[in-house]
Amino acid sequence: MKSGVKKLIVSKEGILFCIFLFVFFLMSLLSPGRFLSWYNLQSMAYQLPEFGILALSMMIVIVTGGINLSLTYTATLSMIVGGMVMANISAAGGNGILAVLAGIVIMIGMASLCGVFNGFVVAYIGVTPMLATLGAMTLFEGISLNITKGGAISGFPFEFLMIGSGTVLGIPIPMILFILIIVGTWLFLERSKMGMSIYMIGCNPKVALYSGVRVKRIIFQTYLIASVLAAIAGVLMASRYNSAKESYGSSYLLQAVAASVLGGTNISGGEGKIAGTVIAVMILQVISSGLNIFGLNRYLTNVVMGGILIVVLTINFLTEKRSK
Amino acid sequence: MNIKSLKIKELPILLILLLLSLIITIANPTFLTVENFLDILKSNLVLAMMALGMLMVLLTGGIDVSVASIIAAVTVITGQSLIHFSSNIFVTILVACLSGTLMGLVNGLLIAKLKIPPIVATLGTMSVILGLVLYLTNGAWITGIPDSFIEFGRITLFSFELVDGRTIGFPVQVLFLIPVIFLTWFILKKTVIGRGIYAIGGNLESAERMGFKADRILIFVYSFEGFLIGLAAVVHTSIMRQVDPNAFLGFEMQVIAAVVLGGASVLGGFGSVLGTVIGVSLFCVINNGLILMHIPVFWQKIVVGLIIIGSISIDMIQKQRVEKNKIRVDVE
């Protein structure tokens, strides 16, 4: 038992969690009464899920050895198309709940189409993920712009706003969704046969193929699942902003990569834990909220975030070098 | 030999370029005028210079997403130095190249010495540099660039008079691009470092066993890229005559896309200066053509995205076909 605890603390996720606790207490001490205020904790609980879901979506793709640069534009394209349908039904005097359901179904359907597109180009045509999704990113952004003409889609029914701002038993709905998705992706990636195959593909696709893994099909499915996750993040964003626009969340793209890597995911694939990514997301959220409370210029917050990324990776490198 | 290699690698994309030019010319004959050609050239010099730096990075198997933030930083430094320090063109070039090279050097050290994967390292430097630039400038434009520098930017070479009496000529900034193209080509093809760059991109381990010092080469590549960005910043400032710290948001993706259109592989080891020049031209011609054909701005991204995915997909399908044929021969 004791050695089990020790192992847990020394593991990558354990160290990350200690960093999280440290940052959390540091912020609480430095801004007494404000960081730990109910208001701040709740606003973090509303902001965290959309970024966290996008990071998890990015992470499972990175584990296959790929990357998805079209991630945020998949989310926005689907929220724009679904949002338009929802706003139209609502404007025509349709039932609010029905409109919301139709909207969400269409958002997830649209994201699936994006995922099928990415998955097909990457898995079956064999284009390098970075390029395929770079093209897809431009493409999705273009389609979104064509629909919105640069504006935003709004006029969602009241029921839709509840998703992003409502609570169940005092817990924000986005947070509940996020927890469900964490458990879901954990079961999928770390406890299922397909998850096992994903790690194998990320380590060495050729060996995976010869071990009987259907490499192409699994990569295809991974992009599909990642896109559906992006759509869920899109639902949360659209609901929170009460509108849909192509540029929403675009700053999350590279942050999602950063969170995955900070969480111990190997950028070239085959390695990474859901817990690590989730803790990394929490660390980044606590730091950005904390710095915001201190009134630090938001551009300087970017500097700090970039600095942390580099410092953590440097420490990683040094510790690995020592253990060798 | 030279013609043969051209035939295999760069011919398809050259054909696409010519075909596209033909279509655009039929749709709008303005495309095929000297004036339009010079316009395209002038507005894409920066892209071309940065693409050549990015080509080297991609050849080593790396990637640099910090290029847009570096050029934003260097243009701001250049602008300030022009206003407060010296309006001398040579001093300006020196300041710009030095600051660009330094920022590239930081990337190089992080990647070569600390072994941080390129995309992550440059992601980090990107947010640090861009954050600092926007914090220090507050996003405000820098105006009041000295007249002597603006006059320099207006110089044209080989000027001649048009039928309607206006004079046009090559922008002086071309004098920056041509040596850069030649220098990049020379380094890649004629020096040991260049051979090392291709070797690292092909297979890092075997390159090191062959005696190439991978970390030195990587540091050189990222620093050289920074140097080129410095030159590009001078060109940009002299064309725009003011500095907008936000001018380059998202520009890194355009640079990468142009290099990739030119046939370079993001996995490293493949790509050439000629291919990159054609790729950049293709990128510019598409953008220019869409404007001349009066296609709404919103369609441009769709077309560019489709062309990126389409051209690489075709390339991959061809490669797979070649691979299949190879295997069949082996079996027989």
Image (tube, grey):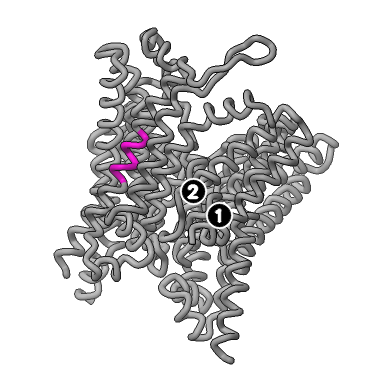
Task: Out of B151 and B101, give the one closest to the viewer.
Answer: B151
Q: Chain of mark 1?
A: B
Query: Residue B24, position in %: x, y?
Result: 73, 37
Query: Residue B120, position in %: x, y?
Result: 36, 51
- Which numbered dot is residue B274? 2
* Residue A215 vertical placement versus B62 (above, below): below
Which element type, helix, strand or loop, lies under badge 2? helix
Query: Separation of disc 1 and disc 2 at Cα?
Result: 8 Å
Q: Which residue is mark 1?
A: B10
Task: Out of A269 and A110, give the one closest to the viewer.
Answer: A269
Q: Amino acid at mark 1?
A: Glu
Q: Determine the residue positioned at 76% across, 38% down.
A: A87
Q: Determine the residue positioned at 69% across, 50% down.
A: A107
Q: Are marks 1 and 2 in contact (CB under 8 Å)?
A: yes
Q: Chain of mark 2?
A: B
Q: Residues within 10 Å of mark 2 (few under 14, many from 20)?
A: some
Q: Is residue A314 visible?
A: yes
- Which numbered dot is residue B24? none
Q: Determine the residue positioned at 75% across, 42% down.
A: A86
B225 in magenta: yes
Query: Residue B128, position in %: x, y?
Result: 32, 37
Task: Give the quarter of the figure containing the C terminus of chain B.
Answer: bottom right
Sequence-first tag of 1 and 2:
1
* Labels 1 and 2 in the same subunit: yes
Image-based side of A183 in relation to A165, left or right: left
Q: Residue furthest bottom?
A: B332
Which element type, helix, strand or loop, lies under badge 1? loop
Which segment is the magenta one?
A: B222-229
Q: Amino acid at mark 2?
A: Leu
Task: Out of A5 and B67, give the one closest to the viewer.
Answer: B67
Q: Is residue A292 visible?
A: no
